[in-house]
């Protein structure tokens, strides 16, 4: 067997169909027990190269991959529980949960990791990460993370936050946590909208983007421009690691994992505050299919929110260039 698709986990978003370079995955035209049209592998084991891009794209931990010699090349991470998530089909919160958990597992720190779940769609993240979690009041995850890390500096502490949570109600918290140089990691999900509450405008909503509170499109005369949080935090003099990735496709997802890994390595080594923004899709509230959401993110968000590393800690003795 080359790939195993766990039928019941599949929400039929089709991200794996798009990701497979050989077109070996298709819709089954049947519904699983949860009412989703699940996908199936339509090739023979010889057809599949075992590249794992299908599994990398899956937000639901639904695919595992073996190579032709029978060696498993993509395995679900022990950093996540086996619980199925409540996220909508195609939502990439599940992808970022997995990347975070994989990194913590690879660094061998799952047993001493603590996450802070936000208020937003990922409010139930404590059900999915396989280690201790706190639940913070809306926007206050960096403050809770600060307390946890200062009390137990040997723990690996991260806040996981949406853009309403972090950039709107929690704008003050994140700015000061970064400015104090707390040795925590923040994973920031920028999906350009408030997901949980029904698609209201966020500080990160694109100019002209229609939301339930900007039904004619975001008017920058009235509401200003979308907030580039990485650039804002990178302007602080305090040493930090600040980076932005995206998870709309498999290639960018793999790159984003490297950014997240770097962020946690810096925390493990007690180096500095670390922050990774992840451009993510919200098909339901964008009113697009999962596939259309991928193009919208690539064509609309990435030109405004450039990807890359905005700030890195300087080697000892060298002044921060931006200070
Ligand atoms: C103090 C307070 N104000 C407002 C809310 C309502 N509320 C819940 S989630 C949310 C925004 C969530 O959006 P975001 O942080 O972008 O996360 P997403 O759901 O998109 O992942 C808001 C305003 C609340 N729960 N508590």
Image: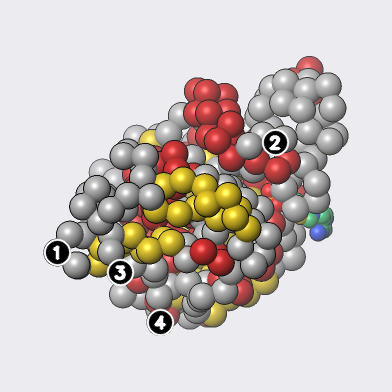
Please state which of residues 119 and 2 is positioned toward the viewer in this rendering: 2
Mark 1, residue position: 69
> In this rendering, which labeled residue sits more in front, label 2 or label 3?
2
Mark 3, residue position: 107
Task: Characterize the local packing of mark 2: few (<14), some (14-19) or many (20 or more) Cα atoms within 10 angstroms.
Answer: many
Q: Are marks 4 and 1 in contact (CB under 8 Å)?
A: no
Residue at 51 percent across and 75 percent down: it is: 82
User: Could you tell which of marks 1 and 2 lies nearer the N-terminus?
Assistant: 1
User: Could you tell which of marks 4 and 1 lies nearer the N-terminus?
Assistant: 1
Element marked by disc 1: loop
* Mark 4 and mark 1: Cα distance apart in space: 32 Å
* Mark 2 and mark 3: Cα distance apart in space: 35 Å
* Mark 3 and mark 1: Cα distance apart in space: 27 Å
- The answer to whether residue 273 is seen in the rendering is no
Mark 2, residue position: 286
Task: Characterize the local packing of mark 4: few (<14), some (14-19) or many (20 or more) Cα atoms within 10 angstroms.
Answer: some
Element marked by disc 3: loop
Q: Position of residue 133 (x, y in %)?
A: 58, 75
Location of residue 323 with respect to 102 vertically, above or below: above
Mark 4, residue position: 111
> In this rendering, which labeled residue sits more in front, label 1 or label 2?
1
Q: Position of residue 90 (x, y in %)?
A: 58, 47
User: Could you tell which of marks 2 and 3 lies nearer the N-terminus?
Assistant: 3
Q: Is residue 21 left or right of residue 60?
A: left
């Amino acid at each position: 067997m080359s790939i195993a698709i766990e039928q019941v986990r599949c929400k039929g978003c089709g991200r794996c169909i798009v990701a497979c370079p050989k077109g070996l995955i298709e819709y089954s035209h049947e519904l699983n027990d949860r009412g989703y049209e699940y996908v199936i592998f339509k090739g023979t084991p010889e057809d599949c190269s075992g590249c794992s891009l299908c599994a990398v794209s899956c937000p639901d931990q639904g695919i595992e991959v073996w190579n032709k010699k029978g060696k498993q090349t993509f395995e679900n991470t022990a950093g996540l529980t086996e619980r199925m998530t409540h996220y909508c089909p195609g939502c990439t919160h599940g992808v970022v949960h997995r990347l975070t958990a994989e990194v913590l597992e690879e660094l061998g720190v799952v047993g001493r990791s603590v996450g802070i779940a936000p208020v937003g769609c990922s409010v139930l993240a404590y059900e999915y990460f396989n280690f201790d979690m706190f639940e913070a009041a809306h926007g206050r995850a960096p403050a809770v993370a600060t307390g946890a890390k200062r009390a137990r500096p040997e723990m690996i502490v991260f806040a996981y936050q949406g853009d309403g949570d972090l950039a709107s109600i929690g704008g003050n918290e994140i700015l000061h946590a970064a400015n104090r140089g707390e040795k925590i990691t923040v994973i920031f999900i920028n999906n350009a909208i408030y997901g949980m509450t029904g698609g209201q405008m966020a500080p990160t909503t694109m100019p002209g983007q229609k939301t339930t509170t900007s039904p004619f499109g975001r008017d920058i005369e009235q509401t200003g421009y979308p907030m580039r949080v990485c650039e804002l935090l990178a302007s602080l003099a305090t040493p930090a690691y600040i980076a932005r990735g995206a998870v709309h496709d498999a290639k960018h997802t793999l790159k984003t994992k490297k950014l997240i890994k770097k962020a946690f390595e810096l925390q493990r080594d007690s180096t500095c505050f670390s922050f990774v923004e992840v451009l993510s899709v919200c098909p339901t509230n964008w009113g697009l299919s999962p596939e259309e959401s991928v193009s919208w993110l690539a064509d609309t968000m990435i030109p405004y929110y450039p990807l890359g590393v905005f700030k890195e800690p300087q080697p000892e003795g060298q002044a921060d260039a931006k200070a």
